[in-house]
Image: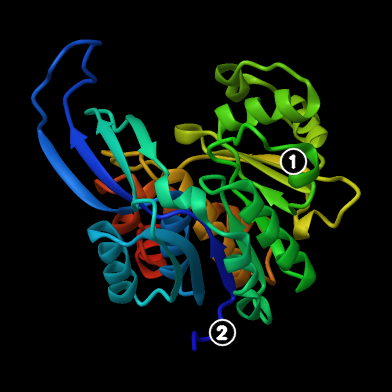
Amino acid sequence: MDRTADVIVVGSYVQDHAWLTDRFPEVGETRRALGFNTGPGGKGFNQAVACLRQGVATLFIGAIGDDHLGAIARRFGEDEGLPCRWLVVADAPTAASSIVVDQTGANLLVVNLAANERLDPAFVEAQADAFDGAKILVLQLENNLDAIATALAIGKRFGLLRLLNPAPVHPELDAQLLGECDLVTPNETEFALLLERIAGERVAAATLVERPNSELHALARTLGVPTVIVTLGAEGCFVSHDERSDKRGDAKSFYRVRAEKVNAVDSTGAGDAFSGALAAAMLRFRDKPFLDAVMHANRVAAISTETVGTAPAMPTFGAVARRFAR
């Protein structure tokens, strides 16, 4: 029996394969890689590891194939001390990705989601006992939407705060499903896609960081989610609360949080570090303004870029506290 978890992550596992290069190759060009790294990843698994390493009891629920990569997933979870409930899919492999990282830390990524898209809603429903007593549910969109909808319904049944990292934006995502979430954490591109899909508002993602806070807040309020956090990479993040709510203890309805200065070598998984750490920080700093949780998540994301890889790159709570001691 799993220990009682405060955070439940229902999401994806992906075996990452990353190549380091001085610059991205042109179409048709072959470049020599400067290095190679393989390890556990997937948005859901990354977020679960990030959350666990902040010292918060976490449970991961996901799907893998009955293969070698699935065995690696099981082993890493066990070594990490992360309780996992795996659906082993017989007719699909464990998901895998190909990532190219240039010398600035930017990345190009393709992924075969494979078993993640076979996460049976009935299997998710069968894990409902784990939700009883938990406080936060964390989700992404690398799984089939019926499994995500089932998890949201269970989370609502047990009174969990439901946090969605809408990445990648699923082609069938609609306002009804998004409206089941209490908090969403899109990046600029995902935010622009959500605005077009949900609100019919076309906005160029590249212009978002330059827009006034009041304008970003007005755009965020069209999504129908109480709290929206737009992650802005090296520019930090923007927070927008429903003005009719308690603003999660914040003094302001909207504000920006600057990024921390670090020596980034690989930005892959930074958004996952943010979302997973945010869930943990909301519990660790539950008696403080939401801003404190956001600042901690920002710092976790920043440090994660200093190590090549995704799940293994997630820093611990202690590492973050030492790095940013004031």
Percent across and percent down for residue 244 are: 91, 49
- Pick the residue in front: 195 or 281: 195
* Image depth: mark 2 or mark 1 in front: 2
Say which element carries label 2: loop
Q: Is residue 220 above or below residue 72?
A: above
**Quadrant holding the C terminus:** bottom left
Residue at x 25% of width, y 63% of height: 72
Q: Amino acid at mark 2?
A: Thr
Percent across and percent down for residue 63 are: 45, 60
Along the polypeptide, which appears first: circle 2 or circle 1?
2
Q: Is residue 138 above or below residue 267?
A: below
Instruction: Tell me whether the residue at label 2 lies in contact with that at label 1, contact meaning CB atoms closer than 8 angstroms.
Output: no
Query: On the image, which quarter does residue 288 sit in?
Result: bottom right
> Residue 4 — which label?
2
Farthest-out residue, front: 91
Q: What residue would you read off at disc 1?
A: 254
Residue at x 45% of width, y 50% of height: 43
179 sits left or right of 40 in the view? right
Q: Is residue 325 in view?
A: no
Percent across and percent down for residue 135 are: 67, 73
